[in-house]
Image: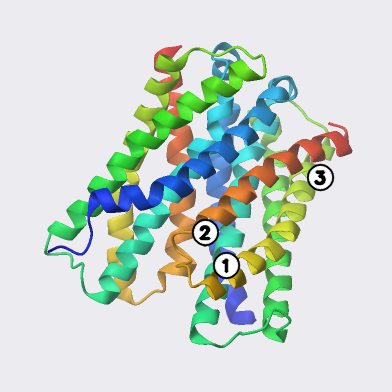
């Protein structure tokens, strides 16, 4: 008798995945609504994988560390000092990664894309940092709740957080484009 | 704190630059996004999918190796895991295409139609799923051999490779259809 069974894995994964797909399709529909903005200035398209990817990475690394710490028992309360330090650290790292990559995209844009205003740098900086600011408390809540409910974080917490992140990332990107006035 | 920073930051920066590659490719898909209406709706879901299917594979492989139910010489357990990945890589992209079409029609947008959307999403899903699964096994093997915690390194790297592969194959198959 083998430990893993393909059909069992598929069956267990389907419900969460179908919800994730629906949420992402709604996110994609928002992109579709504003497709003219993106087609008028294709450099904006390059921010979609950047913001969603890095947002997902930061929250999943933070989430993975948090759930491991909860399992080991080194963190048990939400206002733990080490936890707060970690949250701030991940926020700072997010800001740095978004700033560096945005600056790089801007500096190389004259070779690869049409000439663009320097203000374009502010879009991923704003949207990305706001996303991490939003995702850290969300990750905290989801991780604590699932730990209390005894749900395996690998199968539920991470997909839930990355899906929430993808959706919020798209809305924040569109908001950033509007606020910064690109 | 310092340790967390030096463990995580290089990976995050590396992923940032890889995501820029994906972004650059998406940027060059401008014409396909124009000529294939409905394609953009699938983009976030297709990227999310790769992280979800292969992220779960990596964590199962990691746990499986730790518990000793998977070892790299015995193929049975590995085969079941890969079968699951490939099955999900067909079922879920087909659902994405169907939902994308329905949402397009519902909000009054053009769509290139279910058959073309399904062709693109399933081809992209299967190919990127297969390539990424091989990478997952390789990375788990290397991480385990060297005693690296997969949580901090392999998951973000694989999710990022997944985005790059998904967008690249999307470009390829959009070109085929267009």
**Percent of width and height locating residue B87:** 29, 40
Which structural element holds mark 2? helix
Q: Is residue A119 positioned above or below A93 on the image?
A: above
Q: Nearer the viewer, residue B169 or A148?
A: A148
Name the disc covering residue B14, or none. none
**Percent of width and height locating residue A50:** 62, 45
Q: Which residue is drawn at 40% across and 36% down?
A: B92
Q: Distance between the residues labelled 1 and 2?
A: 7 Å
Residue A170 occupies which quadrant of the picture? top right
Q: Which of B97 and B29 is in front in this view?
A: B97
Q: Nearer the viewer, residue A128 or B114?
A: B114
Give the letter of the chain under mark 3. Answer: A
> Which residue bears the numbered disc 3?
A122
> Which residue bears the numbered disc 1?
A63
Q: Answer yes or no: do the residues labelled 2 and 3 have beta carbons within 8 Å?
A: no
Name the disc covering residue A158, or none. 2
Residue A65 occupies which quadrant of the picture? bottom right
Q: Label 1: few (<14), some or many (≥20) within 10 Å?
A: many
Whether marks 3 and 1 lie on the same chain: yes
**Percent of width and height locating residue B111:** 55, 14
Q: Which of marks 1 and 2 is nearer the N terminus?
A: 1
Which structural element holds mark 1? helix
Quadrant containing the N terminus of chain B in the rendered view: bottom right
Horizontal side of B112 relative to A97 (left or right) equals left
Give the letter of the chain under mark 1. Answer: A
Q: Which residue lies furthest to the front in this view?
A: A149
**Can residue B7 be seen?**
no
Horizontal side of A62 relative to B92 (left or right) equals right
Whether marks 2 and 3 lie on the same chain: yes
Q: How far apart are marks 3 and 1 (CA)?
A: 27 Å
Q: Is residue B87 positioned above or below A128 on the image?
A: above
Q: Earlier in the sequence, mark 3 or mark 1?
A: 1
């Amino acid at each position: 008798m083998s430990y893993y069974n393909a059909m069992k894995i598929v069956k267990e994964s389907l419900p969460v995945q179908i919800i994730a797909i629906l949420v992402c399709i709604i996110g994609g529909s928002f992109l579709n609504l504003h497709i003219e903005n993106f087609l008028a200035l294709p450099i904006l398209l390059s921010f979609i994988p950047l913001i969603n990817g890095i947002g997902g990475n930061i929250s999943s690394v933070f989430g993975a560390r948090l759930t491991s710490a909860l399992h080991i028992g080194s963190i048990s309360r939400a206002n733990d000092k080490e936890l707060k330090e970690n949250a701030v650290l991940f926020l700072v790292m997010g800001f740095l990664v978004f700033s560096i990559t945005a600056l790089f995209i801007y500096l190389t844009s004259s070779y690869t894309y049409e000439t663009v205003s320097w203000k374009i740098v502010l879009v991923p900086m704003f949207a990305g940092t706001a996303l991490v600011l939003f995702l850290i408390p969300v990750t905290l809540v989801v991780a604590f709740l699932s730990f209390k409910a005894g749900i395996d974080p690998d199968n539920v917490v991470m997909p839930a957080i990355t899906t929430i992140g993808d959706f919020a990332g798209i809305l924040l990107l569109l908001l950033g484009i509007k606020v910064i006035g690109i | 704190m310092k340790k967390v920073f030096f463990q995580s930051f290089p990976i995050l920066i590396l992923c940032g630059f890889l995501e820029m590659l994906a972004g650059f490719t998406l940027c060059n898909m401008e014409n396909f996004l124009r000529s294939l209406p409905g394609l953009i709706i699938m983009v976030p879901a297709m990227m999310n999918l790769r992280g979800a299917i292969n992220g779960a594979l990596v964590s199962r492989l990691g746990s499986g190796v730790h518990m000793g139910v998977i070892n790299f010489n015995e193929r049975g357990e590995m085969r079941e895991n890969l079968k699951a990945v490939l099955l999900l890589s067909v079922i879920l992209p087909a659902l994405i295409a169907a939902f994308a079409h329905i949402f397009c029609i519902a909000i009054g947008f053009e769509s290139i139609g279910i058959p073309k959307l399904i062709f693109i999403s399933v081809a992209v899903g299967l190919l990127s799923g297969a390539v990424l699964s091989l990478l997952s096994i390789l990375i788990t093997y290397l991480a385990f051999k060297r005693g690296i915690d997969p949580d901090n390194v392999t998951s973000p790297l694989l999710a990022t490779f997944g985005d790059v592969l998904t967008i690249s194959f999307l470009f390829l198959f959009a070109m085929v259809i267009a």
